[in-house]
Image (spheres, helix red, strand yellow):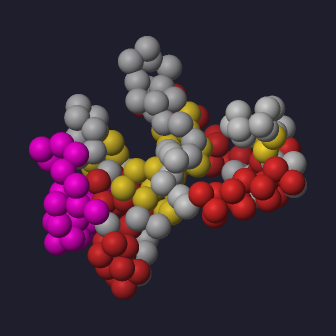
Amino acid sequence: KHFNWPRSSTFNLLGTLASRGYLYEPRARGGYYPSPLWSSLLQQIERAEPIPDQLRALLHALVERTGETAVLAATSGTYAMFIAAVESPHAIRYTAPTGKLIPLHVTATGRALLSLLSPADRAGVLRRATFERYTPTTLMSVAAVEKEIQRSLQRGWFEGAAEYTLDLGGVA
């Protein structure tokens, strides 16, 4: 119901995951729950493709020098996904949970990632983007995003000015 998926497809998917040990159903029609097998799978993935120690050290160094939260993100379709974060030591801070998805075009981090794509790939991503107004400063067109990317490349750094979250700025 949550994903609005067809019941038959969902039943088959849940059945497969349960038969392979990834889900369990404590009582009939009581809902499925993830099994500890997920934790084991995640540990295997982390061991196979760990985030390099140098990148983790860089995140910690950025937090120490700035006092702000530092995030490592990767492109995932039209989103930036946080794959590692070190939060600021301050009581009031930006929290950046691993796995969080943010539209690429509305943050400094996202636009920095977009700038690394070829012009054709970037145009393709921006064509698929949803230009929703999150705040009064949200960039609302492909042209506006491209202009900001070019300005940032000339400047040597990317800036986000409360375009996704009010009162939140970012540098990438």
Left or right side of 153 for 87: right
- Residue 40, position in %: x, y? 85, 44
Q: Residue drawn 72% across and 61% down?
A: 12
- Dividing the picture into quarters, in which one does residue 23 lie? top right
Residue 116 location, x and y as percent? 43, 71
- Look at the picture and state if 166 lies above or below 99: above
Q: Quadrant of residue 161?
A: top left
User: Is 151 within the magenta?
Assistant: yes
Q: Nearer the viewer, residue 165 or 158?
A: 165
**For residue 170, side relative to residue 83 (left or right):** left
- Residue at the image position 51 percent from the left and 46 percent from the top: 2
- Which portion, as a residue range, is magenta? 130-158
Q: Nearer the viewer, residue 3 or 59?
A: 3
Taking the magenta stretch, the answer to whether it contains residue 134 is yes
Q: Position of residue 36 (x, y in %)?
A: 84, 38
Q: Nearer the viewer, residue 94 or 130?
A: 130
Residue drawn at point x = 53 percent, y = 37 percent:
97
Q: Residue at x 63, y 64 (%)?
A: 9
Q: Residue reaching furthest front?
A: 28
Is residue 135 visible to us here? yes
